[in-house]
Image: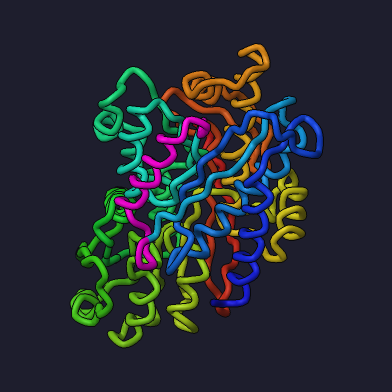
Amino acid sequence: MRPFLRYAAVGLIALLAACSGGGSGSSSPSPAGTIVKIGIDLPLSGADTFAGQTTANGALLAIDQAKPKAPAGLNLAAFVLDDAVQGVHSAQQGAANTRTFIADPSVLGMIGPYNSDVAAAEIPLTNAAGLVQVSASTVSDGLTLGADAAQLRRANPSINNFFRVCTTDSRQGSAGAQFARKLGLKRVYIIDDNETYGLDLANLFEADFKMLGGTVLGHDHVTKDQQDFKALLTKAAAAKPDAIFFGGTSSTGGGLIRKQMFDAGLGALPFIGGDGIADQQFIAVAGKRADGTYYTVAAPNALKLPAAQQFVKDYQNRFHSSVGPYSANAYAAAQVLIAAIERAVRKNGGKSPNRAQVLQAVAQTSNLPTPIGPISFDKRGDVTNPVLSLYEIRDGKPNFITQLNLKI
């Protein structure tokens, strides 16, 4: 385990211990109070550790800070589960974790997951149970938009129970395509991992890149657990692209593809992707060959936001490490749930609310102050002030390029 992850893990364990009890209206928990749990489902082991751990830390920090201020007799607690299996996020495990949350009547809402394919497995379950779900990072359009979203909510079509504080693949893919064209790139070869997030992102990038006058020379999918990409990259090299675009995550091959591009004579080309490669795992796998990688993140850079400076300070003090790409988003997602629970308590005459009341309160969230800006949701559950950030890996480190505010 790298030093950063060791410190993050220690911080998470400590905070889990702090959150396992309850907090009432005073700084000390009331043993007689009602425990209200917020479920947190994220990949916390294996290749996805950095992404999941730093995201979980943000949510746990918000819960910990809210405990002393909670309404009298209400003890907030986190219920954290890992959706990674054998080191990789798993839709099946995410669904199993969700059933665990649903079976616990004290769980009034959940944060997560991190990955869109996991969300697609969870939403039908939370929709049927009326359990509100707020995600910090799942960007696939079909989770909230169109026929795919309607199918996910088929058990309870009259309600929307899934919300997210990040933007969507369509915006992320469009931003990636526009940035590629600004770099002067005309001919791109696309590879994706054939998962919900990666395929969606790659298809949207392809459509926008073509619309902007670019040429897509080929579009291939990798297979699950694939480790050797030599044949695929040799095929791509024969097409003489200006760049490779990857729709996927570090755990589904992002770092390995970038590393093996050099063996296929493609090492001098830019490697472009989305937030699935915005983690330390990508750099750890690709090594020095990670340089020349560009990616988008469906979140603001918290270090650059005046409103996030107290959050950054508190996070660094607690975990002795820098924030991750979705730490601030997760903090905001937890704030949404906590504020909704508190409003539902007041509306319920000071008594612990039920899941339907919390869901209604989340849907009514309007201009809630958070480190990433005020949060409101549209009728689909999408945030109304989405933000994207662009990064380049240079000298083995992510370098922030710019932020795009995408008002809708």
Residue at screen point 40% across, 62% down: 273
In percent of width and height, residue 329 lies at 58, 46
In percent of width and height, residue 137 lies at 47, 48
- Work out whether residue 396 or residue 106 is closer to the camera in this orientation and state it: 106
In percent of width and height, residue 207 lies at 28, 49
Q: Is residue 169 visible?
A: no
Query: Splitting the image into 4 quarters, where does residue 24 fall?
Result: top right
Q: Is residue 117 above or below residue 391?
A: above
- Work out whether residue 79 or residue 370 is closer to the camera in this orientation and state it: 79
Residue at screen point 27% across, 62% down: 193
Q: Which residues are magenta?
A: 85-108
354 sits left or right of 340 in the view:
left
377 sits left or right of 345 in the view:
left
Q: Name the colour scheme.
A: rainbow
Residue at screen point 44% across, 39% down: 101
Residue 41 within the segment the image draws in magenta: no
Residue 106 within the segment the image draws in magenta: yes
Q: How many marks?
A: 0
